[in-house]
Amino acid sequence: MAHQDPPRKRAVTMRDVARQAGVSQSTVSRVLNDVDNGIPIGEETRKRVMEAVEALGYYPNLNAGSLRGQKTFMIAMMIADIANPFYHPMVRAVQDVARTHRYDVMIANTDHLREGEMHFVESVIRRPVDGVILVPYHLTEADIDRLIARTGAAVAVLGQHIHHQQADTVYGDDDQAVFEAISWLINERGHQRIGFIGVTSSFSAGARRRAAFLEAMRHANLPIYPEMFEIGDWSTASGEHAMQVFLSLPHPPTAVFAVNDLMAIGAMEAAQNAGLRIPEDVAIVGFDDIPPASWVRPRLTTVAQRSAEIGCTMAEALFERVLGVYTGTSRRYEVKCRFVKRESA
Amino acid sequence: MAHQDPPRKRAVTMRDVARQAGVSQSTVSRVLNDVDNGIPIGEETRKRVMEAVEALGYYPNLNAGSLRGQKTFMIAMMIADIANPFYHPMVRAVQDVARTHRYDVMIANTDHLREGEMHFVESVIRRPVDGVILVPYHLTEADIDRLIARTGAAVAVLGQHIHHQQADTVYGDDDQAVFEAISWLINERGHQRIGFIGVTSSFSAGARRRAAFLEAMRHANLPIYPEMFEIGDWSTASGEHAMQVFLSLPHPPTAVFAVNDLMAIGAMEAAQNAGLRIPEDVAIVGFDDIPPASWVRPRLTTVAQRSAEIGCTMAEALFERVLGVYTGTSRRYEVKCRFVKRESA
DNA sequence: TCCTTATATGCAATCGTATGCGGTAATTCG
DNA sequence: CGAATTACCGCATACGATTGCATATAAGGA
């Protein structure tokens, strides 16, 4: 190899096209962005330019464009865990909407860590984007305000209401759905001792579902035992562990609700490994309705979230702002959940 | 609302920092990229600059940096389907490696479509990146050559050998693993009629696994029936459909091998919905060993791919090139598969 | 004292694109 | 036929950063 410099290919630039077409670089720019500028372009010139573009295989450099112009043609999306199927339809929907507008999507997962979320904010400040989609677990409203202030990006958020002028929010009715599910366990299935597998995060989804769980228990006048609450980290393994703890109790719960399906599936594993039958010995209810929920046996009873619809709603609201179609104040959308009864409860 | 212009916050620039610190903009640049330039910086100046950076909360604009400088601090990764768990550890590994180098990762999924893969190439030409990680199903070597020629990016590819100077490849020993699995079905389990659920793509993984399947059958001197071959699209639904077709045969297969776990799980669903017992009535073997493979009942027998290791290997090879640590010719890495016997066969 | 060397900083060009403004040729009009 | 438009197009600057080169100051040597 010796000293063979890497063949750093110079990209084809507008100037190359201009030279080839015998026009100035600014004319090329105008031809490419033809969308009715005040300035008309000669038919002959336009044709020569387009031929040169074709011949050289020119593609504009979006980085350069976003430096001079305003638009970066990129949005960023922050999710907690790319391995959680709940996010997949959402991501896919966002990407689909973005693609129709010729936008790229940068996905960052935070591993449910505050550190990860802060890193994301920083990263978006360093590499400006036109819009941001957030599924925050730790970010406060102040953090998001700062993000907007520093980048000027439009923002769509799931599950946390932001009062900022430039942010829209999408809500699920998690609380109602959880209330319905727990009430059903109590009234229709006669459960009294219900275990709860939650998470630590004090904001957002985890906390709201916990509140709804407590509400349902209180509403049924059932006692609330501290040992019926276990903390996980949204992962299957943590759900498994939580269930093991429950099963080691003198009086284990007869039903268990986990705030997401992955933990519910983990709980099922633990119960079955302990030789218990589901739902006869212990009933299990999850949240999300990810595809594996209907692959396991018995199939998991759960609360379905319309992940694709959530993603689509967020993306469309975002792009209305990004494209300047909407410039008003904060909007709020609601996406309904629905309780899906299967065999695990 | 009327005509309230959106408050397009001007970002804090180097010039702002320079003004605040009472130095020139180029000095700020040198302080920030201090990594032993030939040019020394006064201790006093450095301190003033850093204070100004701190005070203003300055972050460099990476887009601007990548215009003048060389590095974009971004790599792109192309996968077929973000919803396929097989890719998750890979993506995660790539992101982890990237993060240690302060790089961002752009993920694009192609839905297994050639169109999607071509779109990705175009997108990378438009928005230059320092490196590209590919899991191609349709891209030819010529396509990849073109990508490198146009962008100068370093490239790491899974499963397809690229002879280009600037590309490394990672291989699994899929063929051996499939051969082993099928031979085991034949010799240890006595299967003779084995169904195969494959895919259309003529390159890469799908085709190699098909070849290995045929090889194993021939090696055992078993006849090969055309009706024992079904085509899916890697999805659970397509696996389900394929199995339904098998089951409608006069002589259905006694065992079925699917080229990925999602289709295998779909096949299980179809078999169980038809009232068959697994593995007694029909044995099922998959490929990948995604987490749901051990959630289904019976647990899925499959060939495990070390997805995280693959991602890690690709990313590390890539960054050796991106950072200029390695500038030699194409390298090739192999990552072993292993056959995991569980209850479905 | 003057010239060299080392040290520290600023100037200005540059990356690829967008765009306000001015300039030229063609056209219209009185 | 001369003047005022109109239709097109190029010049030059800006975006925010990097970097080669020049410059200014201090230190050192003869």
Image (tube, coloured by chain):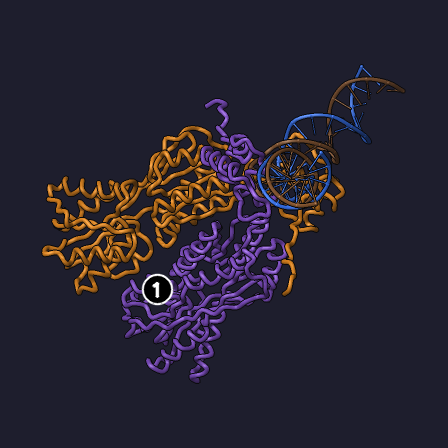
Chain colours: A orange, B purple, C blue, D brown
Location of residue B97 in the rendering, given as x and y in whole percent from the top left corner = 45, 56
Answer left or right for A157 relative to B3.
left
* B331 up-or-down from A69: above or below: below
Location of residue B135 in the rendering, given as x and y in whole percent from the top left corner = 49, 61
Answer left or right for A174 relative to C17.
left
Which residue is painted at 29% across and 62% down in the image?
B295
Location of residue A119 in the rendering, given as x and y in whole percent from the top left corner = 41, 44
Quadrant hosting residue B41: top right
**For the residue carrying disc 1, how many other residues have a C-alpha within 10 Å: few (<14), some (14-19), or many (20+)?**
many
| Mark 1: secondary structure | helix
Residue B23 visible here: yes
Q: Which amino acid does label 1 sit on?
A: Ile
Counting every numbered tag in the picture gives 1
Query: Which residue in the rendered view is the most extreme toward the bottom?
Result: B221
- Location of mark 1 (residue): B265
Answer left or right for B148 relative to B201.
right
Which residue is painted at 46% across and 63% down in the image?
B313
Which chain does the numbered disc 1 sit on? B
Q: Which quarter of the rendering shows the N terminus of chain B?
A: top left
